[in-house]
Amino acid sequence: EEEEEEEGEEEGDNVEEAQELLDSIKENMEQNGGRLDDSYVIKFMKEMLMSMPCKNQGYVLDGFPKTYDQAKDLFNIEEEEEEDDMRGKVHRYDKIIIPDHVVFLNASDDFLKNRIMNLPESVVAGTHYSQDRYLRALSLFREINTEDETVLNYFDELEIHPQLIDVSKFEDVENRLIVKEIIKDVGDPRNYGLTDEEKEELERKQAEERLVREAKEKAELERKEAEERAQKLTNWEEWNKRLEEVKRQEQELLEAQSIPLRNYLMKHVMPTLMQGLNMCCLVRPDDPVDFLAEYLFKNNPEFE
Protein backbone atom coordinates (compact mmCIF):
# COMPACT_ATOMS: atom_id res chain seq x y z
CA GLU A 1 0.00 0.00 0.00
CA GLU A 2 2.87 2.37 0.79
CA GLU A 3 4.42 1.72 -2.64
CA GLU A 4 1.10 2.45 -4.35
CA GLU A 5 0.82 5.69 -2.40
CA GLU A 6 4.35 6.70 -3.43
CA GLU A 7 3.61 5.91 -7.08
CA GLY A 8 0.41 7.94 -6.87
CA GLU A 9 2.31 10.88 -5.39
CA GLU A 10 4.95 10.69 -8.15
CA GLU A 11 2.28 10.64 -10.85
CA GLY A 12 0.59 13.61 -9.22
CA ASP A 13 3.90 15.52 -9.13
CA ASN A 14 4.53 14.72 -12.82
CA VAL A 15 1.08 15.97 -13.76
CA GLU A 16 1.61 19.19 -11.81
CA GLU A 17 5.02 19.76 -13.43
CA ALA A 18 3.59 19.15 -16.89
CA GLN A 19 0.72 21.54 -16.25
CA GLU A 20 3.12 24.22 -14.97
CA LEU A 21 5.29 23.80 -18.07
CA LEU A 22 2.26 24.03 -20.35
CA ASP A 23 1.07 27.19 -18.59
CA SER A 24 4.51 28.80 -18.89
CA ILE A 25 4.64 27.94 -22.62
CA LYS A 26 1.22 29.49 -23.22
CA GLU A 27 2.23 32.61 -21.29
CA ASN A 28 5.51 32.89 -23.22
CA MET A 29 3.77 32.57 -26.59
CA GLU A 30 1.23 35.21 -25.61
CA GLN A 31 4.05 37.58 -24.68
CA ASN A 32 5.92 36.93 -27.96
CA GLY A 33 3.03 37.25 -30.37
CA GLY A 34 2.46 33.53 -30.84
CA ARG A 35 6.15 32.59 -31.11
CA LEU A 36 7.97 30.47 -28.55
CA ASP A 37 11.13 31.80 -26.96
CA ASP A 38 14.44 30.22 -28.04
CA SER A 39 15.11 28.96 -24.51
CA TYR A 40 12.07 26.67 -24.68
CA VAL A 41 12.79 25.53 -28.24
CA ILE A 42 16.40 24.69 -27.37
CA LYS A 43 15.31 22.87 -24.18
CA PHE A 44 12.82 20.70 -26.06
CA MET A 45 15.26 20.17 -28.94
CA LYS A 46 18.00 18.98 -26.57
CA GLU A 47 15.63 16.52 -24.92
CA MET A 48 14.68 15.15 -28.33
CA LEU A 49 18.31 14.86 -29.50
CA MET A 50 19.14 12.97 -26.28
CA SER A 51 16.31 10.49 -26.87
CA MET A 52 17.11 6.89 -27.79
CA PRO A 53 15.75 7.12 -31.37
CA CYS A 54 18.06 10.06 -32.15
CA LYS A 55 21.02 8.39 -30.45
CA ASN A 56 20.49 5.09 -32.22
CA GLN A 57 19.25 6.19 -35.65
CA GLY A 58 20.54 9.74 -35.98
CA TYR A 59 18.58 12.84 -36.88
CA VAL A 60 18.14 15.59 -39.46
CA LEU A 61 17.66 19.21 -38.36
CA ASP A 62 16.10 21.36 -41.06
CA GLY A 63 16.24 25.15 -40.59
CA PHE A 64 17.38 25.07 -36.97
CA PRO A 65 19.57 26.39 -35.49
CA LYS A 66 19.39 29.56 -37.56
CA THR A 67 22.01 31.64 -35.72
CA TYR A 68 25.40 31.32 -34.09
CA ASP A 69 23.94 31.80 -30.61
CA GLN A 70 21.22 29.20 -31.17
CA ALA A 71 23.82 26.64 -32.27
CA LYS A 72 26.00 27.46 -29.27
CA ASP A 73 23.11 27.17 -26.81
CA LEU A 74 21.93 23.94 -28.38
CA PHE A 75 25.20 22.02 -28.68
CA ASN A 76 27.57 23.56 -26.13
CA ILE A 77 28.05 22.14 -22.67
CA GLU A 78 26.91 24.76 -20.18
CA GLU A 79 29.74 26.57 -18.42
CA GLU A 80 29.87 29.29 -15.81
CA GLU A 81 32.23 31.51 -17.81
CA GLU A 82 31.01 34.78 -19.18
CA GLU A 83 29.81 34.85 -22.77
CA ASP A 84 32.45 37.42 -23.78
CA ASP A 85 35.19 35.18 -22.41
CA MET A 86 34.03 32.34 -24.68
CA ARG A 87 34.48 34.29 -27.91
CA GLY A 88 37.41 32.92 -29.88
CA LYS A 89 37.85 29.92 -27.58
CA VAL A 90 37.27 26.29 -28.52
CA HIS A 91 33.74 25.32 -27.57
CA ARG A 92 33.12 22.47 -25.15
CA TYR A 93 30.31 20.83 -27.07
CA ASP A 94 28.18 17.79 -26.38
CA LYS A 95 29.65 15.01 -28.53
CA ILE A 96 26.53 12.90 -28.12
CA ILE A 97 24.21 15.29 -29.97
CA ILE A 98 26.61 17.24 -32.21
CA PRO A 99 25.90 16.52 -35.92
CA ASP A 100 28.42 14.63 -38.05
CA HIS A 101 27.62 16.63 -41.18
CA VAL A 102 26.30 20.11 -41.90
CA VAL A 103 24.84 21.05 -45.29
CA PHE A 104 24.17 24.68 -46.25
CA LEU A 105 21.88 25.25 -49.23
CA ASN A 106 22.40 28.77 -50.50
CA ALA A 107 20.92 30.88 -53.28
CA SER A 108 20.43 34.53 -54.18
CA ASP A 109 17.38 36.39 -52.91
CA ASP A 110 16.08 36.81 -56.47
CA PHE A 111 16.32 33.09 -57.13
CA LEU A 112 14.49 32.25 -53.90
CA LYS A 113 11.75 34.85 -54.55
CA ASN A 114 11.14 33.55 -58.08
CA ARG A 115 11.00 29.99 -56.82
CA ILE A 116 8.42 30.85 -54.15
CA MET A 117 6.32 32.83 -56.62
CA ASN A 118 6.24 29.85 -59.01
CA LEU A 119 5.06 27.38 -56.39
CA PRO A 120 1.50 26.05 -56.93
CA GLU A 121 -1.16 27.58 -54.70
CA SER A 122 -1.96 24.11 -53.29
CA VAL A 123 1.60 23.89 -51.97
CA VAL A 124 1.72 27.42 -50.57
CA ALA A 125 -1.68 27.37 -48.83
CA GLY A 126 -1.43 27.06 -45.06
CA THR A 127 2.38 27.38 -44.96
CA HIS A 128 4.91 30.13 -44.33
CA TYR A 129 5.71 30.16 -48.06
CA SER A 130 3.19 32.90 -48.77
CA GLN A 131 4.98 35.83 -50.39
CA ASP A 132 4.70 38.35 -47.54
CA ARG A 133 5.65 35.91 -44.79
CA TYR A 134 8.50 34.45 -46.79
CA LEU A 135 10.01 37.85 -47.61
CA ARG A 136 9.91 38.85 -43.94
CA ALA A 137 11.55 35.56 -42.92
CA LEU A 138 14.23 35.91 -45.60
CA SER A 139 15.00 39.50 -44.57
CA LEU A 140 15.26 38.47 -40.91
CA PHE A 141 17.56 35.56 -41.79
CA ARG A 142 19.91 37.83 -43.75
CA GLU A 143 19.90 40.33 -40.93
CA ILE A 144 20.87 37.92 -38.14
CA ASN A 145 23.37 36.00 -40.27
CA THR A 146 26.09 38.45 -41.26
CA GLU A 147 29.31 37.34 -42.88
CA ASP A 148 31.18 37.71 -39.58
CA GLU A 149 28.85 35.60 -37.47
CA THR A 150 26.65 32.87 -38.91
CA VAL A 151 25.61 29.44 -37.78
CA LEU A 152 28.26 28.12 -40.20
CA ASN A 153 31.01 29.87 -38.23
CA TYR A 154 30.07 27.85 -35.16
CA PHE A 155 30.60 24.54 -36.93
CA ASP A 156 33.78 25.79 -38.62
CA GLU A 157 35.18 26.52 -35.15
CA LEU A 158 34.45 22.89 -34.22
CA GLU A 159 36.22 21.65 -37.38
CA ILE A 160 32.88 20.40 -38.71
CA HIS A 161 33.09 22.24 -42.00
CA PRO A 162 29.70 22.68 -43.69
CA GLN A 163 29.12 21.49 -47.23
CA LEU A 164 28.13 24.58 -49.23
CA ILE A 165 25.80 24.00 -52.16
CA ASP A 166 24.57 26.72 -54.50
CA VAL A 167 21.00 25.66 -55.29
CA SER A 168 20.73 28.04 -58.26
CA LYS A 169 23.28 25.96 -60.19
CA PHE A 170 20.99 22.93 -60.27
CA GLU A 171 17.95 23.10 -62.53
CA ASP A 172 16.08 20.33 -60.75
CA VAL A 173 12.67 20.93 -59.19
CA GLU A 174 12.79 17.72 -57.13
CA ASN A 175 16.35 18.43 -55.93
CA ARG A 176 17.66 15.03 -56.99
CA LEU A 177 20.96 16.49 -58.19
CA ILE A 178 21.39 18.30 -54.87
CA VAL A 179 20.79 15.04 -53.01
CA LYS A 180 23.52 13.41 -55.11
CA GLU A 181 25.90 16.19 -54.15
CA ILE A 182 25.11 15.66 -50.48
CA ILE A 183 25.61 11.90 -50.80
CA LYS A 184 29.09 12.49 -52.23
CA ASP A 185 30.04 14.08 -48.91
CA VAL A 186 28.06 12.09 -46.32
CA GLY A 187 27.87 8.74 -48.09
CA ASP A 188 24.98 6.59 -49.23
CA PRO A 189 21.90 6.56 -46.98
CA ARG A 190 21.18 3.46 -44.96
CA ASN A 191 18.36 2.28 -42.75
CA TYR A 192 20.62 1.46 -39.78
CA GLY A 193 19.93 -2.19 -40.39
CA LEU A 194 22.25 -4.76 -41.96
CA THR A 195 23.49 -4.37 -45.51
CA ASP A 196 22.89 -7.14 -48.04
CA GLU A 197 26.48 -8.31 -47.58
CA GLU A 198 26.11 -8.26 -43.80
CA LYS A 199 22.81 -10.13 -44.04
CA GLU A 200 24.42 -12.73 -46.31
CA GLU A 201 27.36 -13.10 -43.93
CA LEU A 202 25.00 -13.37 -40.96
CA GLU A 203 22.89 -16.01 -42.72
CA ARG A 204 26.05 -17.94 -43.61
CA LYS A 205 27.24 -17.88 -39.99
CA GLN A 206 23.80 -18.88 -38.76
CA ALA A 207 23.73 -21.75 -41.27
CA GLU A 208 27.16 -22.92 -40.11
CA GLU A 209 26.15 -22.66 -36.47
CA ARG A 210 22.95 -24.56 -37.24
CA LEU A 211 24.90 -27.35 -38.97
CA VAL A 212 27.34 -27.58 -36.06
CA ARG A 213 24.44 -27.60 -33.58
CA GLU A 214 22.58 -30.27 -35.56
CA ALA A 215 25.74 -32.38 -35.80
CA LYS A 216 26.23 -32.13 -32.03
CA GLU A 217 22.59 -32.98 -31.39
CA LYS A 218 22.81 -35.96 -33.78
CA ALA A 219 26.03 -37.19 -32.13
CA GLU A 220 24.46 -36.77 -28.69
CA LEU A 221 21.34 -38.66 -29.81
CA GLU A 222 23.45 -41.50 -31.28
CA ARG A 223 25.49 -41.64 -28.06
CA LYS A 224 22.34 -41.89 -25.94
CA GLU A 225 20.87 -44.55 -28.25
CA ALA A 226 24.12 -46.55 -28.05
CA GLU A 227 24.10 -46.28 -24.26
CA GLU A 228 20.46 -47.38 -24.17
CA ARG A 229 21.20 -50.37 -26.44
CA ALA A 230 24.19 -51.34 -24.31
CA GLN A 231 22.11 -50.99 -21.15
CA LYS A 232 19.29 -53.06 -22.65
CA LEU A 233 21.77 -55.77 -23.69
CA THR A 234 23.30 -55.79 -20.22
CA ASN A 235 19.85 -55.96 -18.63
CA TRP A 236 18.85 -58.79 -21.03
CA GLU A 237 21.95 -60.82 -20.19
CA GLU A 238 21.42 -60.23 -16.50
CA TRP A 239 17.77 -61.23 -16.80
CA ASN A 240 18.70 -64.44 -18.69
CA LYS A 241 21.26 -65.31 -16.03
CA ARG A 242 18.70 -64.81 -13.30
CA LEU A 243 16.12 -66.85 -15.26
CA GLU A 244 18.56 -69.73 -15.70
CA GLU A 245 19.39 -69.59 -12.01
CA VAL A 246 15.67 -69.66 -11.13
CA LYS A 247 15.12 -72.64 -13.44
CA ARG A 248 18.09 -74.48 -11.92
CA GLN A 249 16.85 -73.84 -8.42
CA GLU A 250 13.34 -74.99 -9.34
CA GLN A 251 14.74 -78.14 -10.93
CA GLU A 252 16.81 -78.90 -7.87
CA LEU A 253 13.80 -78.30 -5.67
CA LEU A 254 11.62 -80.58 -7.79
CA GLU A 255 14.25 -83.29 -7.79
CA ALA A 256 14.70 -82.99 -4.06
CA GLN A 257 10.97 -83.16 -3.54
CA SER A 258 10.57 -86.17 -5.92
CA ILE A 259 13.14 -88.46 -4.22
CA PRO A 260 10.78 -89.78 -1.48
CA LEU A 261 8.00 -90.34 -4.00
CA ARG A 262 10.34 -92.14 -6.40
CA ASN A 263 11.64 -94.35 -3.59
CA TYR A 264 8.09 -95.15 -2.54
CA LEU A 265 7.11 -96.16 -6.07
CA MET A 266 10.25 -98.22 -6.61
CA LYS A 267 9.64 -100.14 -3.39
CA HIS A 268 5.88 -100.71 -3.36
CA VAL A 269 4.56 -100.23 -6.91
CA MET A 270 7.19 -100.84 -9.54
CA PRO A 271 8.02 -104.55 -8.81
CA THR A 272 4.42 -105.71 -9.13
CA LEU A 273 3.70 -103.28 -11.95
CA MET A 274 6.69 -104.49 -13.97
CA GLN A 275 5.60 -108.08 -13.51
CA GLY A 276 2.10 -107.20 -14.67
CA LEU A 277 3.41 -105.38 -17.72
CA ASN A 278 5.62 -108.33 -18.64
CA MET A 279 2.67 -110.73 -18.27
CA CYS A 280 0.48 -108.40 -20.35
CA CYS A 281 3.13 -108.47 -23.11
CA LEU A 282 3.20 -112.28 -23.04
CA VAL A 283 -0.59 -112.82 -22.99
CA ARG A 284 -1.59 -109.85 -25.13
CA PRO A 285 -5.20 -109.70 -23.95
CA ASP A 286 -7.96 -107.88 -25.82
CA ASP A 287 -8.33 -105.41 -22.94
CA PRO A 288 -4.77 -104.88 -21.61
CA VAL A 289 -5.79 -102.19 -19.10
CA ASP A 290 -8.42 -104.43 -17.51
CA PHE A 291 -5.98 -107.34 -17.63
CA LEU A 292 -3.28 -105.26 -15.88
CA ALA A 293 -5.73 -104.03 -13.24
CA GLU A 294 -6.93 -107.53 -12.48
CA TYR A 295 -3.30 -108.78 -12.34
CA LEU A 296 -2.29 -106.09 -9.88
CA PHE A 297 -5.33 -106.81 -7.71
CA LYS A 298 -4.64 -110.55 -7.60
CA ASN A 299 -0.87 -110.16 -7.02
CA ASN A 300 -0.96 -107.34 -4.48
CA PRO A 301 1.71 -108.22 -1.90
CA GLU A 302 -0.36 -106.58 0.82
CA PHE A 303 -3.09 -109.32 0.47
CA GLU A 304 -0.86 -112.37 0.38
Image: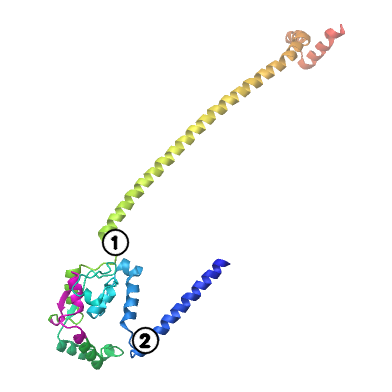
Magenta region, residue range: 141-168
Work out whether residue 16 or residue 302 is closer to the camera in this orientation and state it.
Answer: 16
Q: Residue at x 46, y 75 (%)?
A: 14
Judge whether residue 176 can be spotted in this image: no
| Amino acid at pointer 2 | Asn
Residue 293 vertical placement versus 82 (above, below): above
Vertical arrangement, residue 73 with respect to residue 259, above or below: below
| Residue on which the image places disc 1 | 194
Label 2, label 1: how many angstroms apart (C-alpha)? 45 Å
N-term-proximal mark, 2 vs 1: 2
Q: Position of residue 189 (x, y in %)?
A: 24, 68
Q: Where does residue 258 sit, x and y in percent of width and height?
A: 72, 16
Measured from the top left, where is residue 110 in percent x and y? 15, 89
Q: Nearer the viewer, residue 72 or 295?
A: 72
- Left or right of 11? Residue 37 is left
Q: Residues within 10 Å of mark 1 (few under 14, many from 20)?
A: few
Question: Foreground: 135 or 280?
Answer: 135
Q: State yes or no: residue 154 in magenta.
A: yes
Horizontal side of 277 relative to 300 (left or right) equals left
Residue 280 is inside the magenta segment: no
The answer to whether the residue labelled 2 contacts the one labelled 1, judged by CB atoms less than 8 Å apart, is: no
Compared with residue 168, is residue 131 higher up or lower down, i.e. above or below? below
Query: Mark 2 or mark 1: which is in front?
Result: 2
Q: Residue at x 47, y 79 (%)?
A: 16
Q: Which residue is mark 2?
A: 28
